[in-house]
Image (cartoon, rainbow, N blue to C red):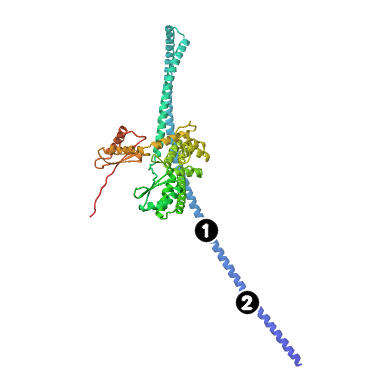
Amino acid sequence: METQGVLLVALASLLGGAGAMFAILRWVEMLRGRDARSEARQIVSQAQQQAETTVRDALLRTKEDALRQKEEFEKELSASKLALQHRETKLERAEDQLRQQTEDLRKQERGVETTQRRLANQIETYNQRSAEMAALLEQQRQTLQQLSGLSREEAAARLMKSLETELEGEIGTAILRHQRRLGETVEAKSREMLLTAIQRYAAAHTAESTTSTVDIPSDEMKGRIIGREGRNIRTFEKATGVDVIIDDTPGVVIVSGFDPVRREVARQALDALISDGRIHPSRIEEVVSETQKKIDDFLLKKGREAAEEVNVHGLSDRVVAMLGRLHLRTSYSQNVLRHSVEVAFISGLLAEMIGLNAELARQCGLLHDIGKAADHELEGGHPRIGADLLRRNGAPPEVVHAALGHHDEIVTEYPYTMLVAAADAVSASRPGARRESLERYIKRMEELESIATSFEGVEQAFAIQAGRELRVIANAKQADDAQAAKICREIAKAFEQQLTYPGEIKVTVVRESRFTEVAR
């Protein structure tokens, strides 16, 4: 029974707890429902407020847009009104211009009508006069036919025959006159071309005479050069191919030889032996061999420099070496290599003026005297020797012919030979180029300066550019600018009257004022 009571109590407690739990849950649900309704009411209220705010904002924006559109419309309307006003103004101006142009056209039409009437009157007058002239000419023709007894065709035939006879004489005279004038023009043009070429290239010739004298420090050195029983001097002469002359002349030893290259090798070798002090046969042979190689390299360099100077390329090493040997050759104290370079330049300038190949002309001029480099070793004159040398080394036929015929010994086949011959004569005969004309050249320079200084107001005068230009210094106190110009003209006139010279002489008068103060 007790157990049952306990169970009942427990069951009752369980049921009571469940009821209490149910009651609590129902109360919680009631509270939640009440909060949801309150929150819903708040949401609805907020939504209404936001809707009202949105509506108010939309109304405000609509009003603002309407105002803005109204302002824009008013602006557009004002701009349209202004554009219409401008257009009306332009139209009024165009109408005024059109009225003015219409008036001008009316005036021009009236002028054209007046001109047409005047021209019509002139044409009518001209026609009347033409008819009168035709009638008068016909009357004169009939009168002429009656007086001469010739018909019109016979008179025309006689007139044509007379004109032909007269024209034949005039044609012959005109041909002779033009031939004479053409000859004078050709001669003057050739002279001008030659003088222009000379003036464009006029190198200063400083003739380098090869020396055969070697200085020695003392006369004791002569004995060392001779050596025991003359073995040193014999070895030296055998190695160099020259003669060594040792006489009583103090301080010098003379080297004699017909070949300038051998003589130069001997001179430099002997100078090197004297400086070294060791003079014996083996040392002599060694020094001569070294000097020979040095001279060969030096001459090859000189040949290349000359070829590059005149812009001639493609020469063989043999030709370049022989060309360099001309550096040690002189002709009437004129250095043959410098003479060849000058002839090359003048030939090239002349070729350019007459439309020939300037590079080929320079090559012809550069190599025309190359035979002089070997004329001591071979038989024959230098033109033939040079031509054979160039032919064997593949030179062009124009170059070979220029070397062979530049002294007019053969019939000229190429124009380059004539150019080289002319340039060769110019280079050889130019004042100052060779010794026999040097004094005359210097005298002409002195004459130029003395004539200029004889004028009043001239302080100094200097002849420059080989006498082609004269610089005159005028006294600034004695002569103003106008007087300086007058002095310049008078000096030029004096040169034309008193001197004979090729080409032109440029006279430049310089006048300057100088002021000097000393600060103390």
Residue 166 in percent (x, y) is at: 43, 16
Looking at this rendering, what residue extends furthest in the front direction?
Answer: 229
In the image, residue 435 sits, relative to residue 214, either above or below, namely: above
Residue in the foreground of this view, choosing between 155 and 480: 480
Tell me the kind of residue under disc 1: Arg
- Disc 2 is placed on an element classified as helix
Identity of the residue drawn at 44% across and 30% down = 105
**Mark seen at residue 31:** 2
Residue pointed to by mark 1: 61
- Disc 1 is placed on an element classified as helix
Q: Earlier in the sequence, mark 1 or mark 2?
A: 2
Residue in the foreground of this view, choosing between 266 and 510: 266
Does any portion of residue 473 appear in the rendered image?
Answer: no
Tell me the kind of residue under disc 2: Leu
Q: Give how far apart the Cα atoms at labels 1 and 2 are.
A: 45 Å
For the C terminus, the image quarter is bottom left
Residue 186 in percent (x, y) is at: 42, 29
**Mark seen at residue 157:** none
Residue in the foreground of this view, choosing between 439 and 159: 439
Instruction: State the image quarter where residue 502 is shown.
Output: top left
Instruction: State the image quarter where residue 324 is shown.
Output: top left
